[in-house]
Image (cartoon, grey):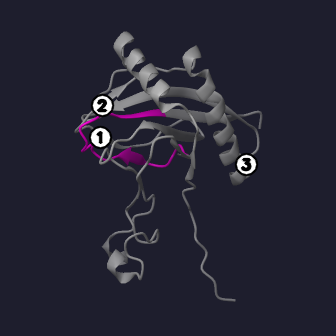
Amino acid sequence: MNKVINLFTTPIYTSSLNCDTSKLKDISYSIKNNEQARHITRPFHGWQSTDLKDKKSLFFLYSELLYHMNTYKEQLGVKGNVELRDIWININPPGHMALAHLHPSCFMSGVYYIQTPKDSGPIYFTNPNSVDYDWNPKLFKDNNSNNLCCDTWDFDPKENDVFIFPSWAKHGVYSNLSNEDRISISFNGIISNV
């Protein structure tokens, strides 16, 4: 039997939450104005809060995120329990970006979008396989979005969108070309009781 087997996929989960983004925006700026940020060494990376797990004002969001993290875990067929390891706010002003990176020592990572002005920058994932130029997109019938030949895959997030992905998946966010801040909440999850 002739068949193609697609190996080594990067499972990206996406959904939309139904949270009050204006309330989350106010909480984000309040934290930024009243607490010290974590030290960022990468250029163009914007502002990040410290870990927010103890912030009672965000508890309603934690249960939403855990629900989607558990849905992702179940869809992957993973055993054990999901735990939220850490969670933080990102505020990327105009011109700022998040360079490609990964999140070591966790199972899954994610990002939830609070404010996404037009042209504020898509999130992108890099192909873990070296596609190189021999698999040029122009060789494929669908050369704009074929996951067989792309070096990166971009998602243009909307407010209330959540993306969950393996922590080993290298990802970043393109430059914010809008005149407003892009605001998101990133998080990491671990699997326990396996």
Is 124 contained in the magenta span?
Answer: no
Image point (28%, 35%), residue name: 180
Tell me whether the residue at label 2 lies in contact with that at label 1, contact meaning CB atoms closer than 8 angstroms. yes
**Amino acid bearing label 1:** Met
Q: CA distance from mark 2 to mark 1?
A: 7 Å
Image point (52%, 27%), residue name: 87
Percent x, y for residue 38? 38, 20
Can you name the residue that lies furthest to the top here? 34
Which residue matches tag 3? 74
Image point (53%, 31%), residue name: 20
Which residue matches tag 1? 97
Which range is magenta? 166-185
**Amino acid bearing label 2:** Gly
In the displayed structure, 163 sits above or below 128; it is: above
Q: Find numbered disc 1 in the image and state the secondary structure of the residue it sits on.
A: loop
Percent x, y for residue 159? 46, 41
Closest to the observer, 190 or 146: 146
Mark 2 Cα shell of 10 Å, populated few (<14), some (14-19), many (≥20):
some
The quadrant of the picture occupied by the N terminus is bottom right
Which residue matches tag 2? 46
Closest to the observer, 146 or 43: 146
- Whether residue 102 is visible: yes
Percent x, y for residue 90? 39, 30
Res 100 quadrant in image: top left
